[in-house]
Amino acid sequence: IEFIESYYYNKLEYTRFSSSVGKYVGFTERGVKIAEYWNNDPSILSRAKAQKEVYCLHNIQIDYNNM
């Protein structure tokens, strides 16, 4: 299971968090700056890392029960 949080502007992805990478990655000049800022803030990074357990692992059992 992987949690991915992507940010877009004008249909262009500029920043993404992936739980398998464990940090934000920027895809544009501005996205790289934003990712660097978010990666250097421990509270933002820990919140993003916790989302896999909060969102994905919580809902996986619901999805399997409905199959």
Image (cartoon, rainbow, N blue to C red):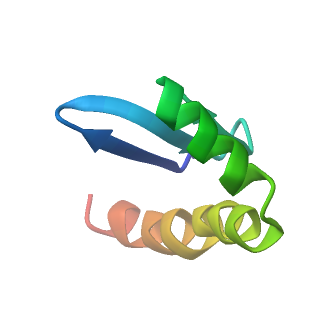
The image shows residue 4, relative to residue 64, as above or below, that is above
Relative horizontal placement of residue 5, taking residue 9 as reference (left or right): right
Percent x, y for residue 20? 69, 38
Q: Residue furthest left?
A: 10
The image shows residue 28, relative to residue 43, as above or below, that is above
Relative horizontal placement of residue 51, taking residue 23 as reference (left or right): left
The quarter of the picture where the C terminus appears is: bottom left
Q: Nearer the viewer, residue 22 or 55?
A: 22
Q: Nearer the viewer, residue 26 or 54?
A: 26
Q: Please report the residue visible at 46 percent of the width from the left and 69 percent of the height from the top.
A: 61
Q: Please report the residue visible at 59 percent of the width from the left and 67 percent of the height from the top.
A: 51
Relative horizontal placement of residue 35, taking residue 45 as reference (left or right): left
Q: Please report the residue visible at 49 percent of the width from the left and 34 percent of the height from the top.
A: 30
Q: Is residue 27 visible?
A: no
The image shows residue 26, relative to residue 5, as above or below, that is above
Percent x, y for residue 33? 61, 39
Q: How many marks?
A: 0
Percent x, y for residue 55? 49, 70
